[in-house]
Image (spheres, grey):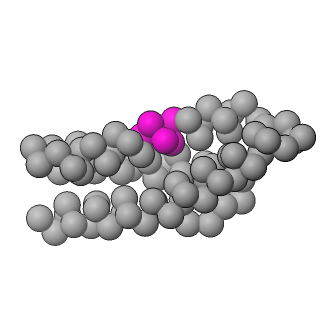
Amino acid sequence: MKKEENLKACYNFLSTFAENLDSVMHDQLFSEKNIDPKVTGNARAFFHLYAFAKQLLDNGNSSTADIDVAINNLTTSADFLREKLRLEY
């Protein structure tokens, strides 16, 4: 269960990033700035991955491998957005 605990910790860590991303995207959508469609698309993908990872973590029947893949995909998306939007984790 150690690996699953680590994955839950990673997810919780990314929760703060999700809150920051939500705020930044909201601010940019209601500003005069043009948003790179790649960033918007990746932000949408991030939130879908985020919801999927939460679902896997909440479901007692999910395999650790599935959770691992979901968290890795979520982290990859977060890294891209962090770089493009200059966000912190």
Asked which quadrant contains residue 28, the reply is: top right
Asked which quadrant contains residue 7, the reply is: bottom left
Q: Give the range drawn in magenta.
A: 45-49
Asked which quadrant contains residue 83, the reply is: bottom right
Residue displayed at 21% across by 50% down = 58
Q: Which of 82 and 20 is in front in this view?
A: 20
- Left or right of 36: which side holds 1? left
Residue displayed at 33% across by 46% down = 53
x and y percentages locating residue 51 in the rendered image: 38, 42
x and y percentages locating residue 25 in the rendered image: 68, 46
Q: Can residue 7 be seen in this view?
A: yes
1 drawn magenta: no
Residue displayed at 51% across by 42% down = 46
x and y percentages locating residue 6 in the rendered image: 27, 67
- Left or right of 77: which side holds 58? left
Residue 16 sits above or below residue 78 on the image = below
Residue displayed at 51% across by 35% down = 45
Q: Considering the whole magenta stretch, tell me its main secondary structure.
A: helix
46 drawn magenta: yes
Q: Which of 74 and 57 is in front in this view?
A: 57
**Quarter of the picture holding the C terminus:** bottom right
Judged from this view, the residue extending furthest toward the right is 32
- Left or right of 79: which side holds 68? left
- Left or right of 66: which side holds 19? right
x and y percentages locating residue 34 in the rendered image: 85, 36
